[in-house]
Image (tube, grey):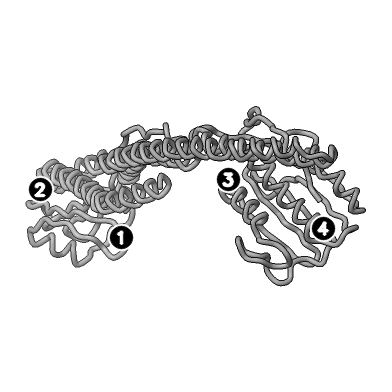
């Protein structure tokens, strides 16, 4: 917008100055010609007045010639005297033209010969051999002397006005663009979940109005989400109260089993269930304004290592390829663990035993990173199963969890089949310590 404003200002100023300066240049040219003609006319009249008495007597003709020679010089208009007998006095050849014959009738006038320039003719009455004519000839250069300097001054004024207009337009554009970018930054912060962001009312009235409405919208969203979070906390507390009792009953039932190994196995499952319930409650109580961070590379290595014993039991070869440095993504730790667990769990549950799989984390296009879980199995029969739809023994919940985790963070989800390759793309988060307290995930079963 700033560049377009500058272009518009430059074009408008150029058009206005063209409409103004073109007539001025023509006016200066005409003024220069009029000034030179007036000076030549005054010169011719002075010469005619000075030599008039001398031409009355043939003996004083030398005085007239001296007078004519005195007014000629380098760079001055050529002044000539044409006597009544056709002879001339002055520099250059003299020709008796129709204009000279007309001047002998007693008329003083100015005309422009076909060769260019301008001539001033003034009759001298009282000459002994008839009416003489004083002729002052102006060349094109003498006629328009000083025009170029005037044009350069006008061009300088025009350029200065254009630059001044561009400077003012640039300042105005900077103000408009700055206010617009400030609004965009505020909108980006609100979109990222920072509901404390507010736009500064600046710029023209229209942008100040937009800033005020954006602030009002942010405050309204904040109020609605605060109320929703309060209801969620109440629901989480109620959920905790309802689940604690049956879970405690399960633990007591497990302790009464006679088979110690079976009792320990069921107790482990009950403990895993308790941790899952705690994770759900913590997720519901998490402050909405918190900026979650998790290390994608560390989570991928951790979850792959967690599922490694089960993979070895099934005779699967697994590889993990992650960068050694942290790869922070804007996803809570527990949600990222659940997404990776869902993808690895799909491989373990829905591919033949002995099928190898590979987990990798790498940079993607732009400021993004991707997590890829690939296996050498036959892949999905057609498209991946949708959430809640059964296909190949799968409900589709695992892939839906992974999909929502990526899309909620502003990333993308993609699946390639035959062999299967599931890709989660995340935007890279700002460098900061990952958030979330790692909790022990559910133990693998089967």
Residue that label 1 marks? 116
Q: Tell me the residue that label 3 is attached to.
A: 409
Q: How crowded is mark 2: few (under 14 residues within 10 Å), some or many (20 or more)?
A: some
- The local crowd at label 1, few if under 14, some if 14 to 19, many if 20 or more residues have their Cα within 10 Å, is few
Closer to the chain start, of discs 4 and 3, is 4
Q: In this view, does 296 lie above or below 7?
A: above
Q: In this view, does 142 lie above or below 384?
A: above
- Please determine whether, in this image, residue 273 is positioned above or below residue 91: above
The spot of residue 75 in percent (x, y) is: 34, 42
> Toward the viewer: 140 or 185?
185
Which numbered tag is attached to residue 135?
none
Q: Tell me which label, 2 or 1, sits earlier in the chain.
A: 2
Asked if labels 1 and 2 touch by Cβ distance under 8 angstroms, the answer is no
Residue ID at (88%, 59%):
353
Q: What is the CA distance from the residue labelled 4 to the residue labelled 3?
A: 25 Å
Disc 1 secondary structure class: loop
Q: Are marks 4 and 3 in contact (CB under 8 Å)?
A: no
Q: Horizontal and vertical percent for residue 390?
A: 66, 66
Q: How far apart are marks 3 and 1 (CA)?
A: 82 Å
Is residue 223 shown left or right of residue 352?
A: left
Residue 332 versus residue 69: which sits nearer the camera? 332
């Amino acid at each position: 917008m700033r560049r377009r404003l500058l272009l518009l200002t430059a074009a408008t100023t150029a058009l206005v100055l063209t409409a103004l300066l073109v007539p001025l240049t023509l006016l200066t040219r005409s003024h220069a010609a009029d000034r030179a003609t007036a000076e030549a006319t005054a010169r011719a009249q002075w010469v005619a007045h000075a030599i008039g008495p001398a031409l009355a007597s043939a003996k004083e003709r030398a005085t007239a010639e001296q007078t004519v020679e005195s007014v000629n010089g380098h760079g001055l208009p050529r002044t000539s005297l044409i006597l009544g007998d056709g002879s001339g006095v002055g520099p250059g050849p003299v020709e008796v033209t129709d204009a000279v014959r007309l001047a002998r009738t007693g008329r003083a006038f100015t005309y422009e010969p076909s060769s260019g320039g301008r001539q001033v003719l003034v009759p001298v009455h009282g000459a002994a051999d008839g009416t003489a004519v004083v002729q002052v000839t102006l060349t094109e250069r003498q006629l328009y002397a000083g025009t170029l300097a005037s044009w350069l001054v006008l061009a300088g004024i025009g350029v200065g006005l254009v630059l001044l207009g561009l400077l003012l337009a640039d300042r105005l554009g900077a103000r408009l663009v700055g206010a617009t970018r400030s609004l965009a930054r505020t909108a980006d912060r609100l979109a990222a979940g920072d509901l404390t962001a507010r736009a500064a009312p600046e710029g023209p009235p229209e942008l100040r109005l937009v800033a005020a409405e954006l602030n009002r919208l942010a405050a309204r969203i904040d109020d609605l989400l605060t109320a929703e979070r309060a209801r969620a906390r109440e629901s989480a507390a109620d959920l905790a109260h309802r689940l604690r009792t049956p879970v405690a009953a399960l633990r007591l039932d497990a302790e009464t089993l006679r088979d110690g190994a079976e009792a320990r196995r069921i107790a482990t499952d009950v403990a895993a269930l308790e941790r899952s319930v705690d994770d759900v409650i913590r997720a519901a109580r998490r402050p909405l304004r918190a900026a979650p961070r998790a290390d994608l590379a560390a989570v991928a290595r951790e979850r792959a290592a967690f599922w490694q014993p089960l993979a070895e039991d099934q005779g699967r070869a697994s590889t993990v390829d992650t960068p050694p440095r942290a790869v922070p993504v804007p996803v809570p730790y527990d949600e990222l663990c659940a997404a990776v667990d869902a993808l690895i769990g799909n491989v373990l549950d829905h591919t033949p035993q002995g099928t190898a799989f590979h987990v990798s984390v790498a940079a993607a296009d732009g400021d993004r990173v991707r997590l890829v879980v690939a296996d050498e199995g036959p892949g999905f029969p057609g498209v991946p199963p949708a959430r809640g739809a059964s296909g190949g023994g799968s409900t589709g919940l695992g892939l839906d969890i992974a999909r929502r985790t990526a899309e909620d963070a502003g990333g993308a989800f993609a699946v390639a089949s035959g062999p299967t390759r599931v890709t989660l793309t995340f935007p890279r988060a700002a460098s900061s310590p990952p958030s979330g307290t790692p909790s022990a995930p559910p133990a693998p079963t089967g």
